[in-house]
Structure formats: C-alpha cells, structure tokens
Image (spheres, rainbow, N blue to C red):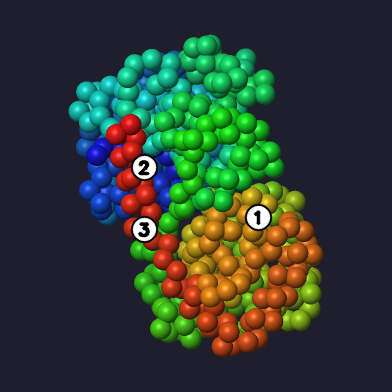
Amino acid sequence: MKVLFASSEIHPLIKTGGLADVAGALPVALRAKNIDVKLIMPAYSGILEKLPPVQSRRNLGNPFSVGDLILLETHLPDSDTPIYLVQCQSLFELEGGPYLDSHGNDFADNDIRFAAFSWVCAMITQYGHLIDWQPDILHLNDWQTGFAAAYLAAWRLEHPPVVTTVHNLRYNGSFPIEQFDRVRLPHDLLNLHGMEFYGRYSALKAGLVYADAITTVSPTYANEILTPTYGDGLDGTLKAVRHKLFGVLNGVDYNEWSPSIDPYIHTHYDLHSIDQKLYNKLALQRENGLPESPEAPVFGVVSRLTEQKGLDLIPDAIEPALEKGAMFILLGSGDKALEQQYLALQERYPDQVSIRIGYDEAYSHRLQAGIDMLLIPSRFEPCGLTQLYALKYGTLPIVRSTGGLADTVFEEGQHANGFVFQHASTEDLKSAIERSLIAFNDLEGWRIKQIQAMSQDHSWDRATATWINLYQSLLNA
Ligand code: ADP
Ligand code: GLC
C-alpha cells in the first residue's frame, strides 16, 4: 500500500508543535509495517541542508505565477523514509518560521503558499506517472494541506481516497473570499457545503468536506468537536460528516522520548531505577541557578504560550504552592502578555521560579526529566504530547479533563498516573495542585503512580494497526 503523507512541519526538520512530532514518527512506524509511506513538505529555508543530497528533481511549472514549483526527492536523515520537498523560492525561502515572518505576523500570502504546496500533493495523487509513484491514499494534515482535497474535487476525476487528520480545529486556514481567485479554484466550491466559511473561505473545511475519511488525534476530541464549544464554527460541518469521522490517539516516538536512552538528560533511568531521576532534578535546579533541593516539589511547563493552553491560570494558582516552598520552571514562547506575567512571577520568587522564553528542544527533554509535575491546564487539547512524554519520564501530569488529556491521564483507580481537574478556573487548578502536593508527600504512593505512568504504552507501534485498518477500509470501499 502506498501512502503520500503531507505535512507543513516534520521533526527533526522543522517544528512549531506536536504536528511535527507526529509527521516525523507515524510514517516511519508505518514503514516498519511494510506500508510504503512517502512524506511531502515545503522546502523552507535551511531544510535541504539538514537532508541527504537530493536524488531527483522535477519541474511542475508555474501555475500560480509565483515562480516554478520544483519537486525534489530525498530521504529523512538516518532513515530510509523518502521525503519530497516542494521548492519555490518566492513562497518558501523566506526569513521567519513556516507560517510567520520574523516579526511574528502571518505571511500575507499564506493562502498561495499552502495552496501551491497542496496543489503539488494533489498532482502527484492524481497523476502518478509524473514521478512514477502514485499513492493509493493521500493523507492530509491540518489546514495547510486542505487545499489538496479541493483541487482533487475540482478536477472531477476518479482519484485515490483522501484522509484528513485534524490536529487543531482552531487553525482553520480561512481567508477573505475576495482573495479566492489567487488559489486557482473554481467558484462552484464556494458554497455552504463546500469551502465557504462565514463569509470567508476555509482550507481546513475543504479538507473536511472533500475527504473520504476524517480523523482527529484523540477519541474525546473527536466527540468534543461536534459541539459548539469546541467546534470552532465547524461543528455543523462535522456533524454532517460524522459517519466518516474517527478519533485515533497519537503515539510517542520512544526513540526520542525515553529516559533510559535520552542523550540530552543528565542521568539515565527507567522503571527499575526511578531513584536516579533525582539527579536530573538537581541538575535542572543547578542549571537554572535555583538551590539544589531534593525535597522541594518542582512543577514545570513546556508549551506554546497561547490561549488554548490555559497558561494564564497558573501564576495565581501556583502561588500557595510557592509559598510552601515549591519550585516552578517554564519553557515556552508565544503570547507577549503571558511572557511578561511569567517573568513577573520569576521576579517575585527568584529562588523558586525559573522562566525561559524561547524554543529549545534539548532543554525541553532536561525539563521533562527534572521536574516532578507537568502542568497542562488546556482549555482544549486535541491530543497533547507533552503529557505523554511526562508519563514516560515518571513526571506526573496535572491536566484539565479535555481532549487527549482526558484520554491519557487519570487521577482515580488503579491506573492513577496524574491529577485531573474539570473547569478552566484558577480555583480548580489550585485544588489539583494542592492534591498533587499531598500525594507528593506520600513517597510510596507517589512511586506507585510513577510506575503506573512509566509503564503505559503509547508507542506508535500500537496506533499503526488502527491506521492500516483505516487505510485498508478506504481501499475496499
Ligand atoms: P501543540 O502541538 O498544541 O503545541 P503538543 O503537546 O501536541 O502541543 O506538542 C508540543 C510539542 O512542542 C512537544 O514536542 C513539546 O515538547 C514541544 N514544545 C512546545 N514548546 C516548546 C518550547 N518552547 N521549546 C521546545 N519544545 C517545545
Ligand atoms: C496540535 C494539538 C495538540 C496535538 C498535536 C499533534 O498541535 O494542539 O493537542 O497533540 O497537534 O497532533
């Protein structure tokens, strides 16, 4: 079975969030099960330098009048997973990240950038002879690839089935209707049952309505997005297509995230040597200029600083714990007001709080290994990967009960592996923090929870069977 897996970010090449982790790991896991998966991504600045030399190059012309679109093929570093790169200087070789310029603003031509990328995905899917490899399935991820489903629909030819995975419904890739002609799609797609979206048009909606199957990254989020609270204006659309909507929980790449082999952390440990985790805690405290204290409970955060993550609740909710001697260590970047709020907290508790604004992959591993509890008070969370990493590191997550957090973290019963609260309020979070402090003081009980956490299996290997069944069912349909 041949699958073209399209993503706008792929770890370790470029990453802004969990989508990159998934795109860097699921295809590799599927290939291990003999599925012929190839990746495709835009050739952003600096990407080619991170990859082995290009093996083939094909010019697909200039359909958007922005310069030629060139398809390059190579494979992921240290892996045989093939990857196509879509090269176009004016669209992708820019200063900044994949979506934002160096001032943090959306690129003004994000519609054309991702329409062009998606157009190439659709071309390969429809016209396999172009590259002597035609996928049996086109697997799209998030709005940046949704245009591909629209092109295939617009061409009105028989084509391989399309799966769209929603990692985050909040980012719907919507643009002004007046700009619609820029993406070279016919106007008959602009209707309520097509791409039209509250007076704009949405690339994600195209990915939903024109796909043969839709998945999202946890069973709970799959239900939540059918409601107005979590549906972000697309709940009506999703309800109409719920027969083809499935929740498939993400996995973890344990080659990257295991405390027994992690090259970034101070001391390796596993389920049978949890005591050694302490050395990572002391090293983390040292690294941050905090007093080395084995007893102080250390709370942490590794996150994008956005409204989604509920991080505005923490500064007030954590104060009583800080007053009792706890520590708090954060790595994150994003919302400037939140950054300031956290820096102010650090100023008030300089010996207990350490805030690092920025993005740092290696430090995120040291943080996960060194802290005792990871705070994730998300307002919504499609899956969430950081709680899964925390579990593997014997770091107990404190989460709001939503999306993938609700599916993976439990406070009660024999699977208890963390702390769960219901409402996105300071009060609820504060009381979960209090419960975690009581639990932390019961050494034996804490160890039992850590063992429970570390022995949960969230490997991709488990999820691949579900994926293969889903692909197969589309081929048999
Ligand atoms: P989301 O995709 O919504 O940001 P996830 O929990 O699925 O949330 O994935 C976030 C990923 O990004 C994780 O791999 C996490 O470790 C990483 N991450 C988030 N913020 C940072 C940061 N400031 N530095 C390093 N890694 C980060
Ligand atoms: C999104 C979601 C996150 C999820 C990730 C990978 O960024 O916000 O919850 O884990 O995608 O699917």
* Amino acid of disc 2: Leu
Horizontally, residue 343 falls left or right of residue 38, namely: right
Q: From mark 2 to mark 1, how far is it between C-alphas? A: 29 Å
Q: Are marks 1 and 3 in contact (CB under 8 Å)?
A: no
Mark 1 lies on residue: 378
Mark 2 touches mark 1? (CB < 8 Å): no
The local crowd at label 3, few if under 14, some if 14 to 19, many if 20 or more residues have their Cα within 10 Å, is: some
Q: Left or right: where does residue 119 sit relative to residue 440?
A: left
Amino acid type assigned to the residue bearing label 3 in the image = Arg
Q: Secondary structure at mark 3?
A: helix
Percent x, y of residue 296: 66, 83
Judge the density around disc 1: few (<14), some (14-19), many (≥20) Cα neighbours within 10 Å.
many
Which sits in the foreground, 73 or 358?
Answer: 73
x and y percentages locating residue 247 in the rendered image: 49, 47
Amino acid found under the numbered disc labelled 1: Ser
The residue drawn where x is 79% and y is 74% is: 320
What residue lies at 37% left-to-right and 49% top-to-bottom?
466
Question: Is 16 situated above or below 5?
Answer: below
Beta carbon at label 1 within 8 Å of ligand 2: yes
Q: Earlier in the sequence, mark 2 or mark 1?
A: 1
Q: Secondary structure at mark 2?
A: helix
* Residue corresponding to mark 3: 462
Examine the rendering and report whether any part of residue 438 can be seen.
yes
Q: Which residue is mark 2?
A: 470
